[in-house]
Image (tube, helix red, strand yellow):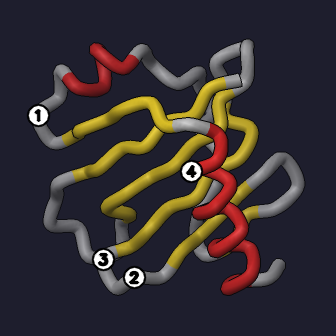
Amino acid sequence: MWYLRCFWSHEFAEEAVEMFSEVGADGYECRKVERFRDGRLGWADERHEVGGTSLGEVPVPPLDEINAQREFSASRIDGDEFERIWKEAIAGQGD
C-alpha cells in the first residue's frame, strides 16, 4: 500500500485540482479524495462514490510518468496524511 498526492493545474471548473489516493499492491486505487476549486471534497472507496469522485479504472501510473505531464505535480505522502484528509472528507460529505 502506498499513498499519492497530486495537484492538477487546469481551467476546468468542475474538475478536481488536488487528488489523494491510497494505492494497493496491484496498483489500483482503494480509496480516493478529491479537492475541488471551491474547497469541497469528494471521496470514493470500493463501495461509495460521493461528490462526483470515483476510483480510477486502470492502475495508477508511476510518479515519473504522472510528473512528465506538466499539468500534474505528484508525490508520495505517508499514510497519516492520507488518513487526515480521508477523515475530513467522509465527515463533511456523508454517503
Q: Name the kind of residue labelled 1 in the image.
A: Arg
Q: Residues within 10 Å of mark 2 (few under 14, many from 20)?
A: few
In the rendered view of the protein, which quadrant contains the C terminus? bottom right
- Left or right of residue 34, residue 62 in this image: left
Q: Residue furthest right?
A: 47
Please state which of the two labelled residues, at mark 1 or mark 4, is closer to the viewer.
4
- Vertical position of residue 28 compared to residue 15: above or below: above
Q: Which mark is residue 58?
A: none
Name the element at disc 1: loop
User: Mark number for residue 81?
Assistant: 4
Q: Is the residue marked by circle 1 packed among few (<14), some (14-19), or many (20+) residues within 10 Å?
A: few
Tell me the SS state at disc 4.
Answer: helix
Q: Which corner quadrant of the image does residue 22 belong to?
A: top right
Q: Earlier in the sequence, mark 1 or mark 2?
A: 2
Residue 94, horizontal then vertical, whole percent = 79, 82
Kind of residue at badge 4 = Glu
- In this rendering, is residue 54 above or below 91? above
Q: Is residue 64 left or right of residue 77?
A: left
The residue lying at 17 percent from left, 54 percent from top is 9
Instruction: Determine contact: label 1, label 4, CB under 8 Å.
Output: no
Mark 4 and mark 3 in contact? Answer it, CB < 8 Å: no
Tag 1 near tag 2, CB within 8 Å = no
Task: Kindly identify which numbered label has been placed on residue 37.
Answer: 3
SS assignment at label 3: loop
Compute the Cα span from label 1 to label 2: 23 Å
Between 46 and 74, the one lying in front of the other is 74
Are the residues tagged 2 and 3 within 8 Å (C-beta)? yes
What residue is disc 2 on? 39
Per the model, the C-alpha gap separating discs 2 and 4 is 18 Å
Residue type of the residue flagged with mark 2? Gly
